[in-house]
Structure formats: structure tokens, C-alpha cells
Image (tube, rainbow, N blue to C red):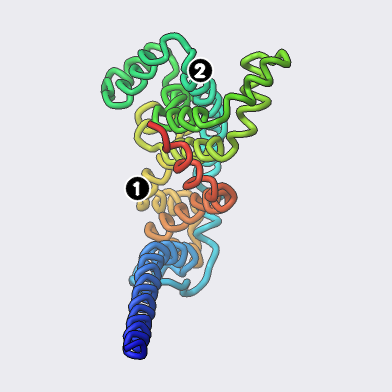
Amino acid sequence: MPNKILKKRKHKGIALDASEKFVTGLAYVLMTIFALIAILPCLHVVSKAFSKGTYVAQGAVWFWPRGFQLETIRYILFETQFFTALKNTLIVTIVGTFISVVVSISTAYPLSKPSFRGRRPVTLLYVFSMVFFGGIVPAYMVVQMLGILDTYAALILPFAIVQFNMFIVKNYFEGLPETIEESARIDGAGDLRILVSIVCPMSTPVIATVTLLYAINYWNNYFHAMMYTQSTSMKTLQVYLYDLINSGAGFLENLTSGGLTTSSLSSNITAEGLTAAAVTLSIIPIIALYPLVQRFLIKGITIGSVKG
């Protein structure tokens, strides 16, 4: 009897190992497929940016450049408003992210304290404004009445705080030990000193998380940038890309009318290639920055979302 039981257990162990290997192998296959689905379209766009125009026009470019050339990239960099749009986007992203993080932290800190009078009604106001939005027309009228249309302020101030990000910071602050703050108060530290010198250094993961979320929001903001700006000098990168995608032929006409067309340019530059080159150049800053901060993203959201 004991031998039979051991044999059955061995058989079950073998079956269990086989099923685990199958599940692990299936997981690797699925993740590989999902990774390819995400990566291959990007490779396709980058390949078009560096391929000869004739191959791009024929649809013969897939995931590797054909007839490698740099004329399309040079044209985007030096003959269009790419650098102006990039400058505007960088200014809005950097300044807006800084303002938003400061406002979110200074709002979340008092709301995380049970002793704060009016904590519940103020929190409900933020929840209400997060669920119900006044609408596009009232928001535009407010920006117009403030006289900040077609300025950087119009692209920053209306988004100075995102309620979801503020609540992430608030929930994280609520999980910090009160004893540390009490010790600082005994030593004579005020609220501002405690926030700057103690709370913020202890909250690096969640601050990095909301910084990344705000930066992505400002960087990708297209609709409001189109609505609040009018002049070419104030176009952001997303609006520039939209105009290029919808009027690539117009860019080529300007190239021809400007007397810049040569046999090399005419064979290398196409409307589709221009779009691919602009998109490729626009994603370089995000690709360069994201690996430095992505490790904080999931960790900060998970920690900051434990409490309701």
C-alpha cells in the first residue's frame, strides 16, 4: 500500500510539473505576441522615416529601412516648425508638471490630516469636480475671459491639478507614520518645514509617479492645445503632428515652390515619409525619459491607492 501511494504521488507530481511548464510556455508565447504587436508598428514607422521615398510610395517598407536616407529627417528638422513645436511642448510639460506637482502636494497634505477642519466637504468638492465637468464651452469662456488665449498659461493653468493624481498623493500621505511628524513638531518644526523636509523625502515613489502622470498628460495634450492656441508660434508638438498628417501634400508643395526640390529630394521625400519622420523624432524624448522613471509608476499607484 505505501508503495502504491508513493507511485500515485509521483505521477501527480509529474502531471503537475507538466501542467506548470505548459502554462509557463503559453504565458511566454502570449507575452511575445503582445510585445510584437506593440513593437512592430513602431519599427514600421521608423523604417519609413529612413527609407527612400519610392519604396515608401510603393508600400514596400515593412520593419527595416529600404534605400536608407536622411533627407526626410533633415527636412523635418530644418524646413518645418518642428523645433518651435518641440520647444513649446517642452516648456508646457516642464513648467506645467512642476506647478501641478506642487499644487497636488500642497493640496493633498492638509486633506490627509484628520484634524483639518472642513476636510470632508473639501474632499467631496474635489470628488464632485472629478465626476462632473462643466463642459468645453464654459472652460473656453473662462480662459477667454482671463485673457490668456494663445499663451502658455492657457495650456498649463486649467490643468494645474488632476483630482485623481491628488488623491493618490493624499492616500500615500495618510499611510505615513504620525510619530515622525509629532517628533518634528516637538523640535519646533512648522507644517511647511515638515512637508518639505520630512514628508516629501519619505514620499519619493508617489511623487515620482504623479510627476510622470502629469508629464505624460501635458506632453500628449492635443485637444486643448488646438482649442486654446491659434498662432503658428504657439503650436505644440501634437498639433504640429496633426497638421502634418492632414496636410503632408501641402508640405511637399512648399518644398517644390521654395525651389528646394532636387532629384535626391524628390525621390526620397513623400507625404507618408514626412509623417513617419516627424512621429519618430517626437517620440525620442519620451523613450529616453521613460526608462528612468517607469519603475516608480506601478509601485507608486499601488501604494497610493491602498486607502479609499
Task: Indicate whether 41 appears above or below 235.
Answer: below
Give 147 or 97, whichever is nearer the viewer: 97
Q: Amino acid at mark 2?
A: Pro
Relative image position of residue 33 (x, y in whole percent): 36, 70
User: Which residue position is annotated with label 1?
Assistant: 247
Do labels 2 and 1 touch, CB within 8 Å? no
- Image point (53%, 29%), residue name: 101
Identify the secondary structure beneath mark 1.
loop
Residue 135 versus residue 8 in the image, above or below: above
Pinpoint residue 255: horizontal percent, then vertical percent. 45, 52
Above or below, 117 against 9 in this view is: above
Q: Between residue 217 and residue 3, name the one nearer to us.
A: 3
The mark that comes first in sequence, 2 or 1, is: 2
Is residue 28 among what the camera can see?
yes
Q: Residue furthest front?
A: 1
Residue at x 37% of width, y 33% of height: 226
- Residue beneath disc 2: 110
Q: Is residue 78 visible?
A: no
Give how far apart the Cα atoms at labels 2 and 1 are. 50 Å
Residue 256 has which mark?
Answer: none
Residue name at image x 32 percent, y 20 percent: 139
Q: Amino acid at mark 1?
A: Ser
Q: Residue at x 32, y 21 (%)?
A: 129
The residue lying furthest to the top in this view is 117
